[in-house]
């Protein structure tokens, strides 16, 4: 019975994808106020132009251009940047017309990163205004070279993150690269005053500039909140029993709520002004001594920002599609409009696709997947 339901759902999604394709090619695309399920992108890929880097086999994406009639693409004020830098080189990361996106690069998630970048470029009205900042910890230049080959015209800069910075502050069982987002302000160019941080297991089906233009007001971080989630579970009884710890949430603008750090709009100017990295490091030191929280890299963000973030519409982080569900059930499409889908959890879409047992929602992710399976790869 579950197989029949799954097949039916796949057919429904495929139909929606085809309708979306026909609609988007019948008239000039309007500003994407509502998310559309992406069309089949394989027709927009150079099938004969394949890249081969040992175990990495990818199609090369076509070049994405700004929509000429869209004046917002040439308006630096639309992106809220410092006009004093207007004369900087067009290729400089300091150019005021650029929208900045930070992600990590590593062997385990490179396929997800490539799909995420592809989805952002495909759904943006101004893809040439994107500047990506990739954080890596492996000195091998292969991954950076791969990104450049897949997206030849992509504006990006790569930054080395020394894992020793954080190794002595966290448990040996944790992944140090997960803490790179704590140090963005010290990794990126000083002229980058604002950045969108994204995990590698997301795709966008909307124009990311809408997220970029959200006003953070006095907040340092903007992110969707999930106040229905039990906030207490992120901290140990030891934390809640000691007022010197638990009172940290007193005096916040709102009651503290869980937010997912996989999608954040960050004001780096405020971040460095209020020394948020140092605040997080202090909590990490306490954790090493007294174990006050669970779940690794998330709680330091909650301790510093929960209750004080700028709440963003949840459509910008529909979470849970990679949840480790032992029953094998698949989460369905959200009933409300969505702009970003997030496969947080152990079940990544590329793993389910490769296993031959994808969830229906994974079909949407696959439209942006540029990976070429070994049996399909041929040298150009």
Image (cartoon, grey):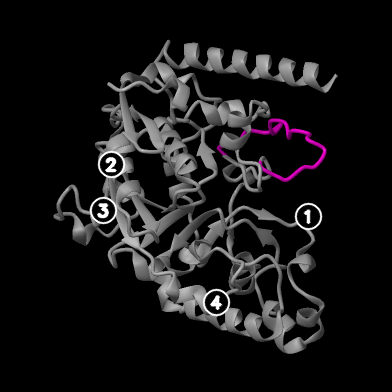
What secondary structure is marked by label 2? helix
Tell me what residue is drawn at x 58 percent, y 30 percent: 354
Q: Where is residue 242 shown, x and y percent of the image?
A: 78, 87
Give the residue number, with chain letter if any, for mark 4.
Answer: 280
Q: Secondary structure at mark 1?
A: loop
- SS type, badge 4: helix
Badge nearest the viewer, 1 or 2 = 2
- Say which mark, if any, is on residue 148: 2
Between disc 1 and disc 4, whose residue precedes?
A: 1
Residue 17 visible in the current orientation: yes
What residue would you read off at disc 3? Answer: 96
Which label lies toward us, 4 or 2? 2
List the single residue furthest toward the right: 1
In the image, residue 141 sits, relative to residue 241, either above or below, namely: above
Quadrant including the N terminus:
top right
Query: What range is drawn magenta here?
Result: 322-340
Q: Which numbered dot is residue 228?
A: 1
Q: Nearer the viewer, mark 1 or mark 4?
A: 4
Q: Earlier in the sequence, mark 1 or mark 2?
A: 2
Instruction: Report which quarter residue 255 is drawn in.
Output: bottom right
Q: Are marks 1 and 3 in contact (CB under 8 Å)?
A: no
- Main SS category, magenta section: loop
Q: Is residue 379 above or below residue 352?
A: above
Binning the other alpha carbons within 10 Å of mark 2 as few (below 14), some (14 to 19) or many (20 upward) gives some
- Residue 126 visible in rendering: no
Around disc 3, counting alpha carbons within 10 Å, would you say few (fewer than 14), some (14 to 19), or many (20 or more)?
A: many
N-terminal-most mark, 1 or 3: 3
Residue 34 screen position, x and y as percent: 55, 31
């Amino acid at each position: 019975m579950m197989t029949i339901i799954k097949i039916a759902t796949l057919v429904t999604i495929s139909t929606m994808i085809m309708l979306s394709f026909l609609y988007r090619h019948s008239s000039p695309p309007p500003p994407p106020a509502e998310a559309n399920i992406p069309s089949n992108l394989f027709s927009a890929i150079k099938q004969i132009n394949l890249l081969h880097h040992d175990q990495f086999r990818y199609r090369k994406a076509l070049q994405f251009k700004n929509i000429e009639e869209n004046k917002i693409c040439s308006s630096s004020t639309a992106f809220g940047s410092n006009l004093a830098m207007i004369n900087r080189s067009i290729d400089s990361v300091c150019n005021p017309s650029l929208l900045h996106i930070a992600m990590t690069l590593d062997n385990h998630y490179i396929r997800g990163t490539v799909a995420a970048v592809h989805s952002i470029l495909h759904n943006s009205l101004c893809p040439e205004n994107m500047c990506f900042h990739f954080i890596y910890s492996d000195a091998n230049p292969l991954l950076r070279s791969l990104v450049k080959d897949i997206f030849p015209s992509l504006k990006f800069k790569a930054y080395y993150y020394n894992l020793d910075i954080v190794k002595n502050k966290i448990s040996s069982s944790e992944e140090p690269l997960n803490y790179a987002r704590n140090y963005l302000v010290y990794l990126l160019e000083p002229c980058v005053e604002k950045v969108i941080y994204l995990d590698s297991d997301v795709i966008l089906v909307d124009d990311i500039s809408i997220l970029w233009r959200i006003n953070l007001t006095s907040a340092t971080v903007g992110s969707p909140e999930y106040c229905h989630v039990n906030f207490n579970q992120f901290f140990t009884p030891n934390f809640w029993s000691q007022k010197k710890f638990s009172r940290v949430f007193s005096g916040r603008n709102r009651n503290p709520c869980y937010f997912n750090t996989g999608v954040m709009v960050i004001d780096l100017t405020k971040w460095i002004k209020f020394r948020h990295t140092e605040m997080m490091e202090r909590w990490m030191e306490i954790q090493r001594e007294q174990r006050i929280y669970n779940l690794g890299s998330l709680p330091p963000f909650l301790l510093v920002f929960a209750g004080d973030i700028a709440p963003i519409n949840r459509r910008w982080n529909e979470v849970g599609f990679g949840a480790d569900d032992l029953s094998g059930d698949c989460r369905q499409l959200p009933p409300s409009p969505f702009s970003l889908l997030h496969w947080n959890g152990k079940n990544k879409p590329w793993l389910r696709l490769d296993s031959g047992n994808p969830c229906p929602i994974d079909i949407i992710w696959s439209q942006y997947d540029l990976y070429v399976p070994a049996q399909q790869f041929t040298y150009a």
